[in-house]
Amino acid sequence: MQTEGAALKPIRSLDDALNRCQGLGMRLSRQRRFILELLWQAQEHLSAREIYDRLNRQGKDIGHTSVYQNLEALSAQDIIECIERSEGRLYGNISDSHSHVNCLDTNQILDLHVELPAELLQQIEQQTGVKITDYRIDFFGYRSPQSIADS
């Protein structure tokens, strides 16, 4: 979450993402549109391979290289999110500062906007001597009570 005003309006919809591309002078190819539409429809974090597979199952004609190049271009411009994980990169539709809930049962990553109390931020600043301007929190947990008993 940002605690100071951001220069750019957050991307909250597919239209916002398309408009940001146009505003940056990025070409809106069919393949780029396919990727953005899929990420906004899926509302989950996907690997490049999953994006490629889903688009091709939908009958969209797109190659591996095109998927990777477009994901790199879109994430480099902060139009989509890129999360580095040990098993590879995952891409999501929310690009502004936000937190994640990591489900240890399903490996699903849920997006969450969390606003920490101003008093807590001030306490952290006093303890560290660092002015907090942005933050992201990663939560980890189990969806089902059975998983806790199994661990």
Image (tube, rainbow, N blue to C red):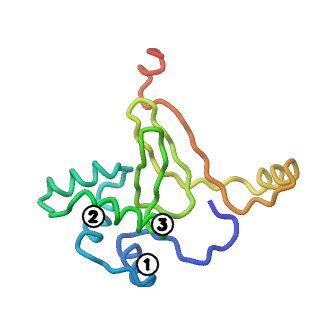
> At which x and y percent is residue 84?
49, 48
> At which x and y percent is residue 30?
23, 73
Side of 4 where 47 appears, left or right: left
- The residue at which mark 3 appears reads as 76
Amino acid bearing label 1: Arg
Identify the residue at horizontal 41%, vertical 63% (top origin). Answer: 72
User: SS class of the residue under badge 2?
Assistant: helix
Residue 104's label in the rendered image is none
Residue 83 drawn above or below residue 73: above
Identify the residue at horizontal 47%, vertical 38% (top origin). Answer: 86
> At which x and y percent is residue 105?
41, 29
Identify the residue at horizontal 88%, vertical 52% (top origin). Answer: 126
- The residue at which mark 1 appears reads as 20
The CA distance from mark 2 to mark 1 is: 20 Å
Q: Earlier in the sequence, mark 1 or mark 3?
A: 1
Amino acid bearing label 2: Ser
